[in-house]
Amino acid sequence: MFTKLEKIRIVDITGVHDVCVAWCGCHTAQERALQVVSLGLYPASVISPKTAFTFRVLSDFLLANKVSGIAAQSYFQRLRRLTNPAFPHKVPDRYRELLRCSRQWRNLKYRKWNGFGHGRGEIGTGGLALDCVACPRPTTNLAPGWEHEEDQWKYMPTFVMDGNFTAEHLQCRGKGDDVALGDGQGFMVANAPYKVHLANSKEQSKCNAHKAVNRGTALRADMDATGIGAVACGRHGCFIPHSVVDFQKGERCGDPALGLRLVCSHLLDK
């Protein structure tokens, strides 16, 4: 049993198309969002989907964004011109839907590539990030009996810490809309423990009325980060999972200290 025909908007690499569909209305039918997914489409809404993106257009946008640096706005403007070259402004704007669905699609890709899904379990800290494959790791790439060799220094992990103090990040206009899909599951540290760490590691200037020092550690009202820091493998330069932090007030030592502590915890878990 099928419902009456309804119009749904499909966004593909060939353009934006309006298609009439009939939903399955059987008592054993899946939710409409799952019916859309079974056809190779990703719904923009899980409640009452009126817009859907093909899997290939989402993958194509992620590749174009990563390799060519194409923004979502420019990418969708291209699709509008493909749909109606004469009057692209008459093509319905689905820019915001593309932003949201592409984020979700990227997160699903990461979960798939790292083997999560179908009841495997919760994703731990750094579970969606890759470790350095060349660094020595017991039970992974070391020969049996390595712990009995005299030259143990060869198997010692080496780390370096560095930061970019000009990579400033502006605050999001609507903080409630900035929802993390994988908080602490990649290379960035989780927000909650990082905020607790910063609250307990306040640094005060020992210079008397030294305005240059105080100005350098001041956080502007329109920023939520003044830079970024990371812990990387000293041999091969690979970032360590769950070790990248946002600098809050210039070159404070307390910001990257948490990243180094989490690296040690990450190695013990391995």
Image: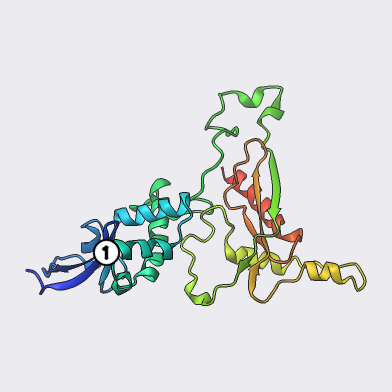
Q: Residue at x 15, y 68 (%)?
A: 21
Label 1 packing within 10 angstroms: few (<14), some (14-19), many (20+): many
Q: Position of residue 91 (x, y in %)?
A: 29, 71
Single out the residue that lies furthest toward the left. Answer: 1
Residue bearing the label numbered 1 = 83
| Quarter residue 143 falls in | top right
Q: Is residue 119 above or below residue 232?
A: below
Horizontal side of residue 151 vs 119, given as left or right: right
**Residue at 59 percent of width and 58 percent of height:** 189
Image quarter where the N terminus lies is bottom left
Of residues 56 and 177, which is closer to you in this image? 56
Q: Front-most of 14 and 167?
A: 14
Name the residue type under label 1. Answer: Thr
Q: Position of residue 130 (x, y in %)?
A: 51, 44
**Quarter assignment of residue 246:** bottom right
Picture coordinates of residue 183, whole percent (x, y): 52, 61
Task: Give the residue at x 49% y 65%.
Answer: 180
